[in-house]
Image: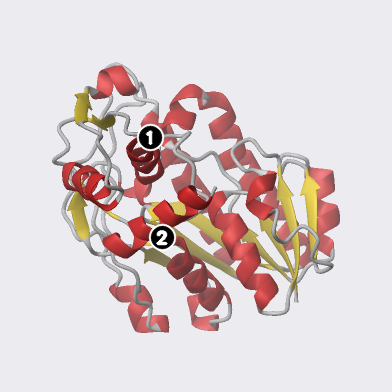
Amino acid sequence: MRILVTGGAGFIGSHLCELLLKQGNEVEVIDDLSTGSLDNISTIQQNPKFKFHLETIINEGFLDHIVRDVDQIYHLAAAVGVSYIIDNPLKSIQINVRGTENVLEAAHKYNKKVLITSTSEIYGKNENVPLSEEMDRVLGSTTKRRWSYSNTKALDEFLALAYHSEKKLPVVIVRLFNTVGPKQTGQYGMVIPRFINQALHDKSITIFGDGEQTRCFCHVNDVVNALSTLMTTPAAEGEIFNIGSTEEISIKKLAELIIKLTNSKSQITYISYDEAYEKHFEDMRRRLPDIGKINKLIGFEYKKNIQEIIKDIIAYYEKK
């Protein structure tokens, strides 16, 4: 097939492109490189079945032209990372809402199947874990910028479900929980690459908050394999799926493990959320996905544990 990946020069998008090419597909990418990088796609740029377009999904005319000639769309283009969203609130909202609406409208015009990538941020401050797809969203005030991301992605989901129910557009929605792996940058607040870079340079590892908050990290290869499988599973259409690991680890223990695995001399220091992000920043103590739904449909199970994930990322940065 010929497949469009929006945001295909990003961390997850570039891994997805590699998988789709290995499967024998032609792949076209639209990316404005706001958070993506040409370095991420350097190993596939010369592939005759791969084409990159330096463009934005805000450009309706260009998007229409590309969508017309593809068979499927993986929509990954979005503002990503807590730091980026807090620093670029208006652009983040425009890309996540207007951009997704443009993708869905073009897909409807030419009747193309779409996968929409959403986020665990959807659940907000709900800590009634594990978090299943039907659970309530618990959000803070609109004066807290981080919650704008949750709301824009929720609107994306509402739009996709509306196109599916009213216009019969084949759509699949996924909520990603802390996807990590080689190529991910710590530039926009992603914790594992930030910690690993600090450890490899024997710099102080900076933890935001008290470090007792827990997260679950899933290797990007497990994630993109799930995306590809869902897109070839008709029963996934019109549904929402959590994708992630259920292996919980505190941020403090994560930092300690990274120091151990890198043989680093780094020490751990703590920074308040107000200092790291913005005044009265709100975070959640736990974020654990219920992955029963995707497991039941396609047999999804994550293959790499946290130690294997960290070793994989360390090897990538040491090679660089």
Give percent across and percent down for residue 139.
Answer: 29, 37
| Residue 9 located left or right of residue 150 | right
Residue drawn at x 65%, y 71% is 20
Q: Quadrant of residue 186?
A: top left
Tell me if residue 279 comes above or below residue 307 in the rendering.
Answer: above
Quarter that holds the N terminus: bottom right
| Residue 63 located left or right of residue 279 | right
Residue drawn at x 42%, y 82% is 298
Q: Is residue 71 visible?
A: yes
| Residue 17 located left or right of residue 179 | right
Q: Amino acid at mark 1?
A: His
Tell me if residue 213 comes above or below residue 239 in the rendering.
Answer: above
| Residue 5 located left or right of residue 144 | right
Q: Amino acid at mark 2?
A: Asp
Give percent across and percent down for residue 153.
Answer: 47, 46
Q: Residues within 10 Å of mark 2 (few under 14, many from 20)?
A: some
- Name the residue beneath numbered marker 2: 312
Cα gap from disc 1 to disc 2, whole angstroms: 17 Å
Give SS at disc 2.
helix
* Color encoding of the figure: secondary structure
Give percent across and percent down for residue 252.
Answer: 17, 41
- Name the residue beneath numbered marker 1: 201
